[in-house]
C-alpha cells in the first residue's frame, strides 16, 4: 500500500501554481478565506487524479515515475519488488494513512478469514468506546462511526448474511459515505488513546507542534483531512492492537553492501496480531 | 433510535399545543412525520443533537429545528454576563446538509452584529466551522463556541476590519459599538 503523503508536498506546489490564484499585491489581504478556497481547489484537483483507494498496480508503474529521478529510488523500488507484489495508491487528502490502514486491515481479514482476530479487534473497539466515554465524549457524537466500522468488520467475514467480496470492499472504500465514516472512527480511536495516555504522548506532541495534548487532538487528530504523523500511527496501533509497518522510500543510502529500504514498525504495547501479519504502508518521502 | 424519535414526537406534540390553533400546524405535523420516516444518518444525528440540547442546555443558548425542516435550525445566543455583550439576544440560523456530522453546518447571524470575526452578511469566521470541524461537535458545542467567540475575538483573521481595528486600537469605542448592537438586538424583529 502506497501512502501518498509524500508526493503531495510536491504535487501541492504544482497545484497551487496551476490554480487561478487571485493576484495579491498585498499578502496581508490573503486571509483565512482565501487559504481555504485554495485548499478546496487543491483537494478537488487531487480528487480527480486518484480515487480514495486505487486499483492494484505493479511496482514497475511506481518505478516509471522516477525513471529520470534518483537512481537510489529505482534501486529501492526494485528491492521492494522482491517483497511486495503490488501497490495501491490512496488519495492524498490528509486522510491517506487512515484510509490505507482501513483497506489493508479489512482486506487482511477478508483474505485470512481470521475469526479470532475479529473477536480480538472487537474487544479492543469496546475498550476504545469506554475510553471515549470516560474522557467525557457524548455517546451520540461517536456511536454511528463505531457502528459503521463494526459493520465493515463483520461483513468481511464470510458465512454470514452480509458477507462481501473483495470488489465490494474496494467499492465501499471508495464510497465517501462509508469510507469517511471509517476514517473518522479511526480518528476518534486515535484521539481517545492519545488523551488517555497523555503523559506518554505529551513529549512527542511537543516535539511535533509545540501544542498541548488537548490542542493537538482538537486540531490535528479529530478534524478530517489532518495528516498523520508517528504519534497518530503509534496511538492507532496501540488502541486497536494491530502492528503497522511504514516503509520509507527516501533517497538515503548508508552502506556499500547494497541498498535496503528503511522501515519503521509500530508494535502495539499489549497483545495484538502476530508479527507475521503486519499491515504495510509505504510512505514516499516529500523530499523527492 | 426509538427514544430519539419519541423525543422528536414529544417536540411535535409540544409544537402542536402551541401552534394548534393555526391551520398551518396540521400541515407541519404531516411534514414532521415524513421527516422522521426518512431517517438519514444526518437527520437521526440531528434528532439526537436536539434531544441533548433540550435535556442539558448550556447556559445562555437555545436552539430548535424550524417547524417543517430538521435541516434548518433557529438559535439564540445570549450575550455573556459582565461583558459589553451582556443582555444581547442574538438570533442565528444553522443550515445542515446530509453530510452532517461529517461536514459542519452553515451558521449565520440573523441579528446585526459588530464583531471582528463576523461578516456583514452574518456569516462567522470560526475554525471549528471551517477547517477544524469534527463530528465531535454537536449543535450545543457549536453554539457555545460562538458564544465564547463574542468576548474572545481572533483579531488575526478579521471578517470585519473596522471592528478588528477598533478592538485592538480603541477598546472604548469598540465597546460602545457593541452596546449599540446589544440594544438593537432587543428591538429587531
Image (cartoon, coloured by chain):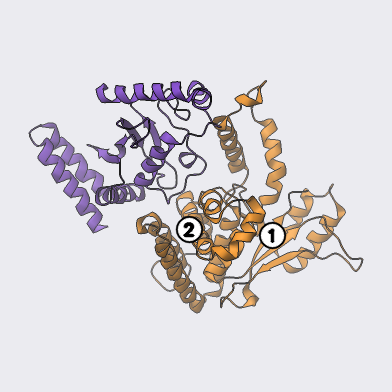
Chain colours: A orange, B purple
Residue B18 percent coordinates (x, y)? 12, 38
Residue B176 percent coordinates (x, y)? 39, 22
Element under disc 1 = strand
Q: Quadrant of residue A200?
A: bottom right
**Going from the N terminus, do you reach mark 2 or mark 1 first?**
2
The image shows a total of numbered marks equal to: 2
Give the chain letter at badge 1: A
Q: Quadrant of residue A135?
A: bottom left
Residue A249 is left or right of residue A121, and the answer is: right
Q: Is residue B183 above or below residue B22?
A: above
Closer to the camera in the image, A170 or B56: B56
> Which residue in the rendered view is the most extreme toward the left?
B21
| Residue shown at 44% from the left, 66% from the top | A131
Q: Mark 1 Cα within 10 Å, few/some/many (few <14, many 20+)?
A: many
Give the chain letter at badge 2: A
Look at the image and tell me in which quarter the N terminus of chain B lies.
bottom left
Closer to the camera in the image, B10 or A194: A194
| Residue shown at 63% from the left, 51% from the top | A210
Q: Which residue is mark 2?
A: A188
The disc label shown at residue A282, or none: 1
Q: Quadrant of residue B175?
A: top left
Asked if residue A158 can be seen in this view, the reply is no
Residue B133 percent coordinates (x, y)? 47, 44
The disc label shown at residue A241, or none: none
Closer to the camera in the image, B105 or B86: B86
> Which residue in the rendered view is the most extreme toward the right?
A256
Q: Is residue B23 above or below residue A80?
A: above
Residue A3 percent coordinates (x, y)? 66, 55
Amino acid at each position: 500500500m502506497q501512502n501518498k503523503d509524500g508526493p503531495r508536498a510536491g504535487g501541492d506546489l504544482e497545484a497551487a501554481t496551476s490554480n487561478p490564484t487571485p493576484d495579491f499585491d498585498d499578502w496581508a489581504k490573503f486571509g483565512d478565506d482565501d487559504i481555504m478556497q485554495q485548499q478546496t481547489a487543491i483537494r478537488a484537483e487531487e480528487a480527480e487524479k486518484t480515487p480514495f483507494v486505487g486499483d492494484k498496480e505493479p511496482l514497475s508503474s511506481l518505478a516509471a515515475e522516477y525513471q529520470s529521478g534518483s537512481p537510489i529510488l529505482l534501486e529501492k523500488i526494485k528491492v521492494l519488488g522482491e517483497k511486495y507484489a503490488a501497490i495501491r495508491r490512496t488519495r492524498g487528502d490528509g486522510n491517506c494513512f487512515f484510509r490505507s490502514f482501513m483497506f489493508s486491515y479489512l482486506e487482511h481479514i477478508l483474505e485470512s478469514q481470521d475469526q479470532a482476530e475479529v473477536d480480538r479487534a472487537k474487544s479492543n473497539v469496546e475498550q476504545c468506546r469506554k475510553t471515549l466515554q470516560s474522557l467525557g465524549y457524548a455517546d451520540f457524537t461517536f456511536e454511528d462511526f463505531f457502528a459503521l466500522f463494526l459493520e465493515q468488520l463483520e461483513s468481511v467475514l464470510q458465512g454470514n448474511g452480509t458477507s462481501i467480496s473483495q470488489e465490494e470492499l474496494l467499492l465501499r472504500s471508495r464510497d465517501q459515505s462509508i469510507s469517511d465514516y471509517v476514517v473518522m472512527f479511526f480518528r476518534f480511536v486515535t484521539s481517545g488513546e492519545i488523551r488517555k495516555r497523555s503523559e506518554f504522548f505529551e513529549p512527542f506532541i511537543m516535539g511535533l507542534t509545540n501544542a498541548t495534548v488537548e490542542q493537538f487532538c482538537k486540531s490535528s487528530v479529530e478534524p478530517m483531512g489532518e495528516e498523520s504523523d508517528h504519534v497518530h500511527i503509534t496511538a492507532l496501533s496501540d488502541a486497536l492492537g494491530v502492528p503497522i509497518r511504514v516503509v520509507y522510500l527516501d533517497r538515503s543510502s548508508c552502506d556499500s553492501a547494497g541498498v535496503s529500504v528503511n522501515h519503521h514498525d509500530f508494535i502495539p504495547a499489549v497483545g495484538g496480531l502476530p508479527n507475521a501479519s503486519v499491515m504495510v504502508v509505504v510512505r514516499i518521502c516529500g523530499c523527492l | 433510535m426509538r427514544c430519539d424519535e419519541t423525543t422528536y414526537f414529544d417536540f411535535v406534540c409540544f409544537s402542536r399545543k402551541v401552534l394548534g390553533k393555526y391551520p398551518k400546524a396540521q400541515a407541519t405535523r404531516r411534514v414532521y412525520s415524513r421527516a422522521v420516516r426518512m431517517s438519514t444518518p444526518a437527520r437521526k444525528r440531528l434528532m439526537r443533537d436536539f434531544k441533548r440540547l433540550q435535556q442539558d442546555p448550556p447556559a445562555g443558548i437555545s436552539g430548535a429545528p424550524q417547524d417543517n425542516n430538521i435541516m434548518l435550525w433557529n438559535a439564540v445566543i445570549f450575550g455573556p454576563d459582565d461583558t459589553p455583550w451582556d443582555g444581547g439576544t442574538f438570533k442565528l440560523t444553522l443550515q445542515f446538509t446530509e453530510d452532517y456530522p461529517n461536514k459542519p453546518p452553515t451558521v449565520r447571524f440573523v441579528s446585526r452584529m459588530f464583531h471582528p470575526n463576523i461578516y456583514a452578511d452574518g456569516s462567522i469566521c470560526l475554525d471549528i466551522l471551517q477547517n477544524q470541524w469534527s463530528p465531535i461537535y454537536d449543535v450545543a458545542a457549536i453554539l457555545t463556541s460562538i458564544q465564547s467567540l463574542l468576548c474572545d475575538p481572533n483579531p488575526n483573521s478579521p471578517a470585519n476590519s473596522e471592528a478588528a481595528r477598533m478592538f485592538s486600537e480603541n477598546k472604548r469605542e469598540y465597546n460602545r459599538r457593541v452596546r449599540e448592537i446589544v440594544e438593537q438586538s432587543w428591538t429587531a424583529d
